[in-house]
Image: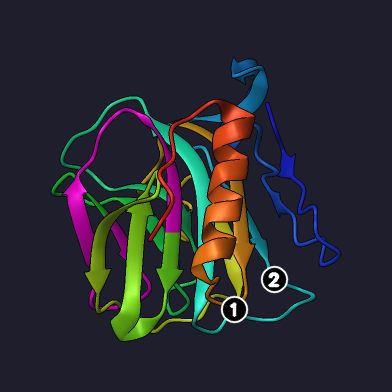
Amino acid sequence: MVGAWEDKTANEDDVTQGTADNKPTLQTNELNGEPTLRFDGSNDYLQGAFTTGGALTQPFTLLAVAELTSTGSVYRYITDGDDASNRMVSGQRDDGDWWIYPGSPALAGDPSDTNWNIWTVVYNGLSSQIWLNGVSEVSGEAGTDEADGLTVGGSYTGAASWWLGDIAEIIIYDSELNTADKNEVGNYMADRYNLSYSDIT
């Protein structure tokens, strides 16, 4: 069981879990020889505040490598913020579509799947966008919440919306990356985990 996922930046804003039953499990050599964290879909999550860099104000960019093991009409969150007014939800919503929710309104894409996906998300109000594996899912208006912390694998409440599957990596930038930088990170993730990625154009 994993009680902490360390932030590799100088901010050291780790996400942690002190309750044994709520800890995800480490899967070694799971994806192209790389480890992943497995969330059980019932109570596993990690959480932490942004204590050094301060709140993420929009625009900001999130990239993640994640897999659902089962889809359906239920909320499944890769990420959230750490309280009710500071959301950065990414994942599956209760109608089974991929979505992001940085406050109302949400932005929803295509029906979810059980593939390993490279997520690229720009949270930027009217100009928010989701790409999966470099292919545009949806663009348009989403909420304008900032985020002063991060929850991985569930909702900020620690009582709902559990991710059912594996998460290999999450990278967050406090700005909107340009296209070249999005593709640089996306191709790094594709190479590391042996996944398909098409350059964003």
Q: CA distance from mark 1 to mark 2?
A: 8 Å
Across and down, in percent, residue 158 comes to 48, 52
**Please, is residue 108 above or below residue 146 in the view?**
above
Locate residue 166 relative to residue 72 in the image: left or right: right
Is residue 172 visible from the viewing direction of this image? yes
Q: Secondary structure at mark 1?
A: loop
Type of amino acid under label 2: Phe
The residue that mark 1 highlights is: 56
**Sequence-earlier tag: 1 or 2:** 2
Closer mark to the observer between disc 1 and disc 2: 1
Q: What is the number of the mark on residue 50? A: 2
Locate residue 147 relative to residue 40 in the image: left or right: right
- Front residue of 2/115: it is 115
**Is 112 in the magenta?**
yes
The residue positioned 58% from the left and 77% from the top of the image is: 175
Work out which quarter of the rendered image holds the N terminus and state it: top right
Marks 1 and 2 in Cβ contact (< 8 Å): yes
| The residue stretch that appears in magenta | 99-120
The residue positioned 51% from the left and 40% from the top of the image is: 65
Type of amino acid under label 1: Leu
Rendering quarter of residue 180:
bottom right
